[in-house]
Image (cartoon, rainbow, N blue to C red):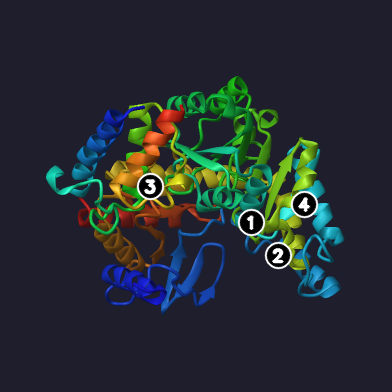
Amino acid sequence: MNLLEKLDAAAAARKSLLPDGVGAFGIPIEEVYSATEARIGDRRVLLLGTNNYLGLTFAPECIQAAHEALDKEGTGTTGSRMANGSYFGHRALEREFADFYQCSGGIVFTTGYQANLGTISGLVGPGDTVLIDGDSHASIYDGCILSGADIVRFRHNDVADMEKRLRRLGERVETTLIIAEGIYSMLGDQAPLAEIVELKNKYRCILLLDEAHSLGVLGETGQGLVEQTGLLKAVDFITGTFSKSLCSIGGFCVSNHPQLEQLRYVSHPYIFTASPSPATIASTRAALELLRKGSHLRTQLWKNCTQLYAQLKETGYQLGPDPGPVIAAILDTPQQALLMWRSLLEHNIYVNLILPPAAPEGKSLVRCSVNAAHTSEQIKYVGDTFAKLYNLVRS
Amino acid sequence: MSETDYDQIVQLLCDRLADLSKTSKESISPETNLITQLSIDSIKLLGLIMEIEDAFDISIPINALTDIQTVHELAELIHKIKSAS
């Protein structure tokens, strides 16, 4: 099979799942009306498949900040952070993230994906080991592959399994980086951070926590799982993204280790790409300010999450173990998931469809992402529709 | 580790691969290709690796699997890691 035939085979496999060409992946959004509504085809749909957890995509403060930066500094930096792409805003945002996490330093990356790629590949290399959760995000896997370090997985959120693997590493634990996530993107469950920190201290490893989905969502000021658990100082490196609660695009890493600064000189995903546009940085700075003061948004978000999680559970759906902004209905087959996804769209609800191998353990998921801007009526409509469609997937 | 150990590893792999691929044990040999003949996808392979790690109390880095195609190549990798541990 040549290179192009391999792609043809992948296309055929995809077509067998989506025979009539209605694409569940990369569906065109024709118009966006608000943080909760958009148009897909000729339907006005309720958005339950975005990562807009605090509902800030249309926050006037962020839009105004982006407009001002656009007018003042132009559309793009046209250069990397290493060259001409470090404007005042980029450096200010790094200080603001460091301050937010009470850390000595912070680095801004162009995307959240690159934040993990750049941090991981900067911290470890050939001969080192990364110990990662089996359900880690692709950016973590790809960062590990880029690094050339040995990649060892432990069973998802299983600290006993993690310890077994740490023990087997012997002296190699000295150069081992443990990686976990605040909230896992597939089932919305949280890492058992206290137990992980205990093992990290026992084996004297370095710990990186990705707060991509938990930033803005967990903790009094929205720092994430580190704040909710009171373990901020126990984590060595925290990464995260701007493209969820902060409603733009970009990523960050903060740490109290002074060596963080060296990543700027060894991390290819930091060096060999253009820096975020001034408008992106400006809206992110405004959003971070709103996030820090946004306990009312978190209260509303959790009210919505709890309402939908309880209703789906009561209907009989199998869900992830923890209620939260990511609520995934776990279905037996890809066909069931596709049928459910299509039926929800016919009821004007857009959710995410996740099929193997993207979903853990060969599962198929219909994943809802709840946000603070959803009204109680909208959440009820979603819950009622899931209940109405339950017969489609009842085993 | 001896030849016997290698044979035991092959035996264990054949048993587990027969279950995973829903084929008979007899149809699997050291030369059998995991992907083209048994249709073992990445998810099944990673699950199998975790089982093997526990069975032999070793760590198998997943990046070491990149070039593995046959039962023999996987058994040899496990044998090598086990011998060094």
Q: Give SS at disc 2.
A: loop
Q: Earlier in the sequence, mark 1 or mark 2?
A: 1
Q: Nearer the viewer, mark 3 or mark 4?
A: 4
Q: Give SS at disc 4.
A: helix
Can the viewer see residue A322?
A: yes
Disc 3 + disc 2, Cβ < 8 Å? no
Q: Which residue is located at x 63 percent, y 44 percent?
A: A125
Amino acid type at circle 1 is Gln
Query: What residue is pinned by disc 1?
Result: A114
Query: What residue is pinned by disc 4?
Result: A264
As rendered, which of A11 and A44 lies closer to the eye? A11
Mark 3: few, some, or many residues within 10 Å (few <14, many ≥20)? Answer: some
Amino acid type at circle 2 is Thr
Query: What residue is pinned by disc 3?
Result: A360
Q: Earlier in the sequence, mark 4 or mark 1?
A: 1
As rendered, which of A191 and B57 lies closer to the eye? B57
Query: Quadrant location of the N terminus of chain A?
Result: bottom left
Whole-Å distance between the Cαs marked 4 and 2?
A: 12 Å
Q: Earlier in the sequence, mark 4 or mark 2?
A: 4
Q: Chain of mark 1?
A: A
Same chain for marks 4 and 1? yes
Residue A16, quarter of the rendered image? bottom left
Whole-Å distance between the Cαs marked 3 and 4?
A: 33 Å
Amino acid type at circle 4 is Arg
